[in-house]
Image (spheres, grey):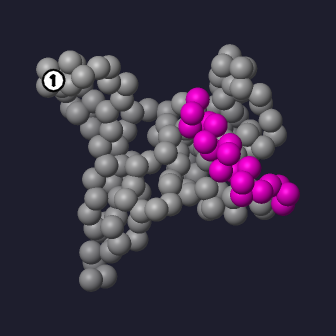
Amino acid sequence: MNVSHWTEQQIEELMQNFSAVCRRIGLKLTHQRTEIYRALLSSIDHPSAEALHKRILIRIPSMSLDTVYRTLATLEQHGLIERIKTVESQARFEVVLTPHHHLICCKCKQIMDFRWPDLDHITLPAVVGQWGRIDSKTVVMYGICKQCAETD
């Protein structure tokens, strides 16, 4: 889950963990992958690839948008980041450190994380077990955030 107040020490520890995981799974640890992961880890707004690219350009002007897209796809494929399922056409991304769910404003597109421990531990219907193995349970709720509702 993205947290708005990571200390530099916490970010460095999480980056060390990222490096260790990449080595363990045989994923080459490139400068681009490291910087994209760091930028995503430091984000609290669940950015799109385009938004992430703009942030990274400040530090690495030669970073291409294609590199950001390919890196996000690779990191997602290896379970290091997650794509947030939204109804909008632009994918949004996050580093997931704890199980959580999302609220998405239909008006301003803001995404907010929330925890729902009861759902995380709910017993699934038998038919789900017959279908196969469930690796994660997530809920995405759509509505209008308080700020947008107040402006209507």
Question: In the rendering, at what x and y percent does residue 126 appear?
Answer: 14, 20
Q: Is residue 88 left or right of residue 91?
A: left
Q: Is residue 70 left or right of residue 6?
A: right
Question: In the rendering, at what x and y percent does residue 9 appear?
Answer: 68, 35
Magenta span includes 76: yes
Magenta residues (range): 60-78
Question: In the rendering, at what x and y percent does residue 99 appear?
Answer: 39, 33
Which residue appears at 65% of the width and 50% of the height?
69
Please rate how many residues cluster around mark 1, counting C-alpha atoms within 10 Å: few if below 14, some from 14 to 19, many from 20.
Answer: few
- Is 59 in front, or is 68? 68
Q: Quadrant of residue 149?
A: bottom left
Magenta span includes 59: no
- Residue 13 visible (yes or no): no
Please name the residue that numbered disc 1 is placed on: 127
Q: What residue type is labelled 1?
A: Val
- Residue 74 visible (yes or no): yes
Which residue appears at 46% of the width and 62% of the height?
89
Q: In this view, does 75 lie to the left or right of 110?
A: right
